[in-house]
């Protein structure tokens, strides 16, 4: 058995869960919701190199025990990290680190850009054309993206 250590408890994790990180416990007195605190703890562990792309995360129930929260809280946090591009959630209980914090930031900013573009009436093609023009200085038509 491997131990996940924190300042409050030590939880036994099966050997097939190789990722070991020191996770900050959640603070129930904080105004930030529990799932966002869990996401932040995992994000910090990834940022500090305690888990690198391709590494498997322990199952949500083990993380929940480690952080003294409900498994659904951990699952909600994992979905946040998935949406940021930091982890991939596979079938069953498998979650792997898929990116770095920098990649997660890029995905987050890209989602913000997409949302803003849609709110302003831009279509996907318009946004692609704008990005091409910003990157190359040439119109999308000049690089063959528009008919």
Image: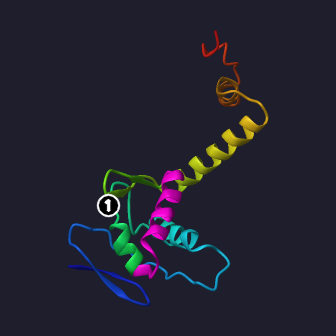
Disc 1: CA contacts within 10 A as few (<14), some (14-19) or many (>=20): many
Residue 45 in the image, given as x and y percentages of width and height: 45, 70
Q: How is the image coloured?
A: rainbow
Q: Which residue is mark 1?
A: 56
Residue 16, image quadrant: bottom left
Residue 13 lies in magenta, yes or no?
no
Q: Height in image: 95 above or below 70?
A: above
Residue farthest toward the bottom in the current orientation of the protein: 8
Verify whether residue 67 appears in magenta: yes
What residue is shown at x 48% (from left), y 54% (from top)? 82
Q: Quadrant of the C terminus?
A: top right
Seen at 68% across and 29% down, the residue is: 127
State the image coordinates of residue 122 (x, y, percent, origin top left).
74, 29
Residues 76 and 105: in front is 76
**First to last magenta residue range:** 66-85
Q: What x and y, as percent, mark residue 120?
A: 79, 35
Specify whether 99 is left or right of 36. left
Q: Residue at x 44, y 80 (%)?
A: 67
* Predominant secondary structure, magenta span: helix
Quarter of the image with the N terminus is bottom left
Task: Please report the residue visible at 32 percent of the width from the left and 51 percent of the height from the top.
Answer: 91
- Element under label 1? loop
Q: How many marks?
A: 1
Residue 69 rendering spot, x and y as whole percentages = 47, 78
């Amino acid at each position: 058995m491997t131990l996940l250590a924190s300042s409050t408890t030590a939880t036994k994790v099966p050997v097939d869960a190789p990722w070991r990180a020191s996770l900050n416990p959640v603070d129930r007195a904080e105004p930030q919701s529990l799932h966002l605190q869990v996401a932040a703890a995992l994000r910090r562990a990834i940022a500090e190199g305690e888990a690198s792309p391709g590494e498997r995360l322990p199952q949500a129930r083990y993380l929940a025990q480690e952080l003294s929260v409900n498994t659904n809280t951990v699952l909600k946090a994992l979905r946040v990290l998935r949406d940021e591009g930091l982890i991939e959630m596979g079938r069953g209980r498998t979650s792997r680190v898929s990116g770095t914090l920098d990649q997660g930031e890029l995905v987050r900013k890209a989602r913000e850009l997409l949302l803003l573009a849609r709110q302003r009436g831009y279509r996907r093609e318009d946004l692609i054309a704008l990005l091409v023009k910003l990157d190359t200085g040439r119109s999308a038509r000049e690089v063959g993206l528009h008919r």
